[in-house]
Amino acid sequence: MLKEFVAGHPQARMADNLGTQGYFNLMSKAAAMVGNSSSGIIEAPSFQLPVVNIGTRQEGRVKAANVIDVGYSREEVLGGYPKGPGSSVPRQPPRHGQPLRPRQCREDYRRAVVGR
């Protein structure tokens, strides 16, 4: 399914591993994160990155306001994205900040991304 999506969308890319700095750099530039990774719960708030969290895998975890929980259906996933797929969504600071890390983590991530 992912390979088919990438093949049909010239702007999409697929990678096995970006490394920490590459991953944080990508998160700093992404319009949104869609999936069920704990990274959407833990790291994404530090980048003010909107997250569409699919399914119940992260159920029961503390989540910042940037996380939108949706079910597994295509309609729910597409409906969870604030302005629809392909839209430019302005980054919003999470209302509750980064729930699972100290305040310093944002600076740590920033240093990891920009190298200072």
Image (cartoon, rainbow, N blue to C red):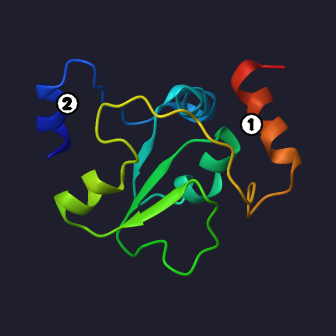
109 or 18: which is nearer to us? Answer: 109
Give the alpha-carbon distance from disc 2 to disc 1, as whole Å: 28 Å
- Identify the disc placed on residue 29: none
Q: Quadrant of the C terminus?
A: top right
Question: Dot 1: what SS?
Answer: helix
Quadrant of the image occupied by residue 69: bottom left
Task: Characterize the local packing of mark 2: few (<14), some (14-19) or many (20 or more) Cα atoms within 10 angstroms.
Answer: few
Give the residue at x 60% y 47%.
44
Q: Position of residue 66 (x, y in %)?
A: 57, 53
Q: Position of residue 104 (x, y in %)?
A: 88, 46
- Identify the disc placed on residue 6: 2
Question: Dot 2: what SS?
Answer: helix
Q: Position of residue 11 (x, y in %)?
A: 27, 19
Q: Is residue 75 above or below residue 62?
A: above
79 or 115: which is nearer to us? Answer: 79
Q: Amino acid at mark 2?
A: Val
Q: In terms of sequence position, does the residue under pointer 2 or pointer 1 come before the other?
A: 2
Residue 110 vs residue 66: left or right? Answer: right
Q: Residue furthest front?
A: 83
Quadrant of the image occupied by residue 53: bottom left
Q: Is residue 55 above or below residue 45?
A: below
- Identify the disc placed on residue 109: 1
Q: Amino acid at mark 1?
A: Tyr
Give the residue at x 73% y 63%.
99
